[in-house]
Image (cartoon, coloured by chain):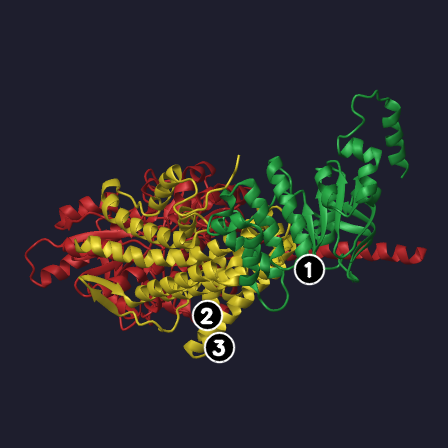
Amino acid sequence: MKFRSKGKWTLAMIVVGLCLVVGAMGSPAWSKEVKLGVFGDVTGPIAFTGQQFWKGYSDYFKWIEKHDPIEGVKIDLLMEDTGYDPKRYLPVLKKFEAEGISAGYIMGTNGTATMNDELRRLKIPCVSEGSGFPPAIEPPGYIFLLRPLYPDVFAAACIHFMELWKKAGHKEKPKVMSITWDVPYGTAHLELGNPWAEKYGFKVLPTQLFAGQPNDLSTQLLRAKSMGADLVFSNILEGQFAVLLKDARRLGLQGKIQFAGGSECRGSEVVKLAGKAAEGAWSVSHFVDWSQKDNKGIQLGMKMQKEFRGGVDYQTQYLMGVIPARITAQAIRYAAKTDGPDKVDAAAIYKALTTMGKIDMLGLTAEVEYSPTERRPFKYLNVSKCVDGTWVEEKYGIEVPWLKP
Amino acid sequence: MLQLNNVEVMFNNVILVLRGVSLHVDPDCIVALLGANGAGKTTTLSSITGLIKTELGEVTEGTIEFEGKDLTKMSTEKIAQEGVVQVMEGRRLFAHLTVEENLRVGARAKKGRSTINEDLDIIYGYFRRLKDLRHATAGYCSGGEQQMVSIGRALMSRPKLILLDEPSMGLSPLMVTEIFRIIKMIHREKKTAILLVEQNAPQALDIANYGYVMENGRIVLDGTQKDLKENEDVREFYMGLSNVGKKKSYRDVKHYRRRKRWL
Amino acid sequence: MTELFQAIASGLMVGSLYSLIGLGIVVIYKSTRVFNFAQGGLLMVGAYLAWSFMEQAGMPIWAALICGLVSAIFIGFLVERFGMRRMIGQPILSLIIVTLALQALIDGVVTLFWGQNNYLVYPEFIPPNPVEFLNVILSLQHIIVFVVTMVVITVFILFFQYSRWGLDMRAVAEDHQAAMCMGVSIKVVFVMAWVISAVLAYIGGVLLGSINGVSTSLHHIASNCFPVVLLGGLESIPGVLIAGLIVGILEYLSGLYLDPIVGASTREIAPYCILVLVLMIKPYGLFGLPRIERI
């Protein structure tokens, strides 16, 4: 009995020893570990969008680890669920701070608005989808946007519409109305966008708002009809856009009014939910759509999905998740090359982002370029149109007015 | 017909409320169960109908048998269907239901063919006032009327045994007399056995054939109507009768207390 | 004028959906005094199940709907048997907390089985054709929701008022112990209440799913139903019907007339404002039963 218990101890010691050895071998001294924190809105109102973002984001890092590693750097992704709930971001940030993250990815306007000041203080650079929060870029801080501000998204729809309007030979002013979601994201384009549109030659009609997931948007649409709107812009999510389009079809407005949504409105989900009602709708976004088969970025997206997901799911938001991953990875690559892999930290990544110049986005978007005074990536946007159930190019590379408060 | 043998009831696994209660009720008989507040009378009734289970109580010892069936293992609604119906203290009407709906619910315990309309007529025969009130909301009726509904509701299932808990509570003396008159009449006409719990000992003993006296969860005294009415302790403590005007010594009281403790 | 009529008509349609879902809460409250916070969850599960039967099992639509109904009955039974039965005789508050836990559980189970990241769409079984009536254009889906709600609610009013089981349920709602003493089986009543409620949730879920698509955000509609239920007086079936319609219409009217003035979406708070006003005047809601206390 005595012998046995001694044997147990010996065994335990050996196991512990082995663990230490293996642990030491697992993290070789030459590989610097860089931690990235993802504020994941994978539950809550934008859960669907957030989960796709996360898939695209994490797949890209898996891909480069396997096929195109950054020399001397091992990237470690941390993801915490923030639920699109403003109360949850700062606790998660504290946790990430304790973990020692060097950079981050924020999925929404809510998180961007909540953490802007805190990130400035902590000096952690974060790429962010939250283009609905202009104070994040003015004065330039640690938030790096992935697309122009929402007023520019609105402007792109207006610019393209005006071109068609003039081509069709109309003389009067076109009328534009926003039917949008009453959250910071949904209303972000109004303050700057409406005065701009007025100057640009539109007549701006009063905005119609709704809350949450609507079941019926008839009254808002009837307002649009009675006021004679020609273009309706909505910065909303796919489920809401589908209801809007379905009700528009029911009220006989499809084809009479041009409906345009933001990039979130361009998923296959919209087509699935709205069916024929989606035909002819526009989506303004900063990246290309899945129909561009010879685009390098699209090809990469397909390869990644085949390898990690077992098949291609044509989700727009998946591509949107690849974009921040690409930007972050390229910045880390640049920092590792210029400063040396062991010096890659928050400051180095920040420096890389602001000074490295143009980032090749594989054609997914226009080339990204930040500078010490600029946090918006580029000034080009694309309009896609739903034709026979798929989103195809309507007009790419619209130069937007670069609106800023 | 109903037989309680040495029943012990515990609440929450700690509080012993009944400490060995034995009593029996014969068919065609009114049995009165007397006692002060907190003596365990209501608990005795609830342990018969199984209601103590909903109050975290439990029969830990002894047996409760009704016509040879063990009631401790049955659910309350089953017991009601066996023909034992409890008229709970404080009347407990379904306040928002009408008088007639209350009575109809009472018919649920009846086994076999439904005779609701017949039974309703019989109840309205006993309690004439209820017929006029049949569509009134029960909760707004007067106390006496509510007591009538409560008793009528129990009668709807044609029970073999009614457990009546303080029918006189909160009623005027005139109404008490009326209620007791009706109880007596029901007993006579329907041959229903009644176990009557009362604070109002004189009234109860007037109509009862047999009586038990409870103290602190025990039966301390039992006897026929005549025995109890003549028992001095009962007269003094429960009926408020004593040899008025005569001198009384504390020794008498002590005598009773001592006696009770040893019983 | 067309806008006003359209707002009222849309409000009626959407409001009837609130009534239907609120009715489930009312039925449970009426017979067990439990405010069921899990109604939205039951609705979501029902909608997902119907989808699974239609799309994954590939059944014809009528068969899938019936299978969904059967599973809804089964779920109601399970919830009662394993969630509520053990709690009989416990304070009502703990039962209410159990329903909150149930909601969280259902959220988790749905995410586990169907994933959180998808909009699922039923094959089209209600054609989305518009129906025009007096210049008001309604979708057939909304009209069907409205008709179904009216039928279901009429049936339930009759059921509670005139059937034996309805009487039992009302009696149990008043006084558990007294009802038991009268031979009413509380367990049967509880099972019935939960099964009915699960079935109502299922109907609501399928109808809502056919309009909005099935997703995990489906259960948020229940939060619109809470003011409806309270406004109607918690235990009144005509109350929940009328309150649902009032809330639906108010939402649309406030969206139409208040939003341009306020400059923000008022439709979500409008029902609560009305609720507060009504409760100040009628503390038991529009059709609630006042607490009877004799002094």
Towards the viewer: A369 or A357: A369
Distance (Cα) linking label 3 and label 2:
10 Å
What colour denotes chain C?
yellow
In this view of the protein, can residue C1 be seen by the observer? yes
Badge 3 crowding class, 10 Å Cα cut-off, few under 14, some 14 to 19, many 20 or more, is few
Distance (Cα) linking label 1 and label 2:
46 Å
Q: SS for tag 1? A: loop
Q: Chain of mark 2?
A: C
Q: Chain of mark 3?
A: C
What colour denotes chain A?
red
The mark lying in front, picked from 3 and 1, is 1
Q: Quadrant of residue C266?
A: top left
Q: Which residue is mark 3?
A: C57
Q: Quadrant of the N terminus of chain A?
A: bottom right
Left or right: B209 with respect to A61?
right
Is the same chain shared between marks 3 and 2? yes
Q: Which residue is mark 1?
A: B83
Towards the viewer: C53 or C157: C157
Towards the viewer: A290 or C285: C285
Residue type, numbered disc 2: Ala
Q: Which residue is mark 2?
A: C50
Eyeballing the image, is A388 above or below B97? Answer: below
Q: SS for tag 2? A: helix
What colour denotes chain B?
green
Badge 1 crowding class, 10 Å Cα cut-off, few under 14, some 14 to 19, many 20 or more, is many
Residue A99 drawn at (x, y percent) = 56, 45
Find out whether the residues at labels 3 and 2 contact each other: C-beta distance under 8 Å.
no
